[in-house]
Amino acid sequence: MSEKTESLAGVVYECVRCGTKVNADELAKLPEIKCICGYRVLKKTRPPVVKQLKAV
């Protein structure tokens, strides 16, 4: 169960309305999933590193 918690700690969500970024662990502390602006729609942001694959 700790592995799942550690993997969620790196997830960052972004508010669709105002663009505020929030970590998953900060969202877990709140009683309801909501941005500071009051909007409830959040999207998961992609990591800045792009995976590079070698052509076969």
Image (cartoon, rainbow, N blue to C red):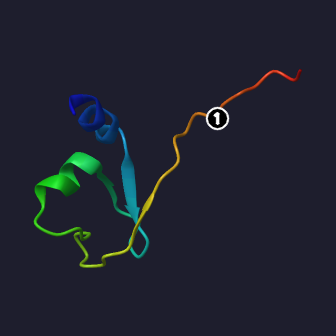
Instruction: Name the spot of residue 52 as percent of width and height, x first.
Output: 72, 27
Q: Quadrant of residue 30?
A: bottom left
**For residue 10, above or below residue 17:** above
Seen in the image, is 54 located left or right of residue 49? right
Instruction: Name the spot of residue 6 as percent of width and height, x first.
Output: 27, 32
Seen in the image, is 51 located left or right of residue 45? right
**For residue 20, above or below residue 7:** below
Q: Mark 1: which secondary structure? A: loop
Instruction: Name the spot of residue 19 as percent of width and height, x first.
Output: 41, 65
Identify which residue, 35 or 33, lies in the foreground: 33
Q: Residue at x 25, y 76 (%)?
A: 37
Q: Residues within 10 Å of mark 1 (few under 14, many from 20)?
A: few
Q: Quadrant of the N terminus?
A: top left
Q: Quadrant of the C terminus?
A: top right
Q: Give the amino acid at mark 1.
A: Val
Q: Quadrant of residue 44?
A: bottom left
Q: Residue at x 75, y 25 (%)?
A: 53
Instruction: Name the spot of residue 31 as percent of width and height, x first.
Output: 10, 66
Q: Residue at x 51, y 41 (%)?
A: 47
Residue that label 1 marks: 50
Q: Residue furthest right?
A: 56
**For residue 33, above or below residue 7:** below
Q: Quadrant of residue 22?
A: bottom left
